[in-house]
Amino acid sequence: MIRVLFVCLGNICRSPTAHGVMLSRLKEEGLEEHVEVDSAGTASWHIGRSPDPRSQHAARQRGVDISDLKARQVCEADFHQFDYLLAMDSSNLKDLKAMHRVCGGTVPQLFVREFAHSFTEQEVPDPYYGGEAGFRHVLDLVEDACDGLIADIRSRL
Ligand code: 4NP
């Protein structure tokens, strides 16, 4: 079993989007038995909340239902339970690296920089204070990077 954790700031916009898209892609590829997916936020503000309605809407437009997900905060145990710790932006990565210095385990990576092929962008920009286009852009980046991630996972299976 390969375990993947997506991490953003609040765990209500970007990482639940990646979580839902990845689950949906894994099912399409028949890999859902081999890969476990979760998401978490570096901040504690939204623990227990459903994804932002704007993220739910943008995901639904691409056929992905993320309405059942609930926000949680990343913790040190995650560094020992997940094989991939995938940060959405460089600020999330910085926070994860600071935790990693303390607890060791899986080395966190920047999701889009490592796995997207069709974009030169390195990060998934925070859509929270912007308009609908930002939420659609999250889907564009995440869909592309999930394809790259699945290829990487296949090479490990
Ligand atoms: P996320 O977006 O990190 O993609 O879940 C945000 C959600 C909430 C806030 C910031 C970013 N906030 O400031 O509450």
Image (spheres, grey):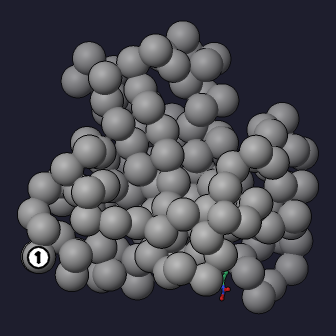
Residue at 41% over, 26% down: 35
Q: Residue furthest front?
A: 48
Residue at 64% over, 40% down: 21
| Residue 144 image-quadrant placement | top right
Amino acid type of the residue that numbered disc 1 sits on in the rendered structure = Arg
Q: Is residue 117 positioned above or below 40 on the image? A: above
Residue at 39% over, 42% down: 4
The answer to whether any part of residue 61 appears in the image is yes
Q: Quadrant of the C terminus?
A: top left
Q: Residue furthest top?
A: 30
Q: Is residue 99 positioned above or below 120 on the image? A: below
> Circle 1 is placed at which residue position?
101
| Residue 24 image-quadrant placement | top right
Q: Position of residue 112 (x, y in %)?
A: 45, 58
| Residue 139 image-quadrant placement | bottom right
- 5 and 74: which is toward the camera: 74
The answer to whether any part of residue 113 appears in the image is no
Q: Position of residue 34 (x, y in %)?
A: 39, 18
Q: Is residue 66 positioned above or below 136 on the image? A: above
Considering the numbered disc 1 on the image, is that residue within a helix, a strand or a loop?
A: helix
Give left or right: position of 32 versus 57: left
Q: Residue furthest bottom?
A: 129
Q: Is residue 139 positioned above or below 144 on the image? A: below
Give left or right: position of 11 versus 39: right
Q: Could you classify mark 1 by the number of other residues whose Cα lies within 10 Å: few (under 14), some (14-19), or many (20 or more)?
A: few
- 36 and 150: which is toward the camera: 36
Q: Position of residue 156 (x, y in %)?
A: 23, 24
Q: Quadrant of the N terminus?
A: top left
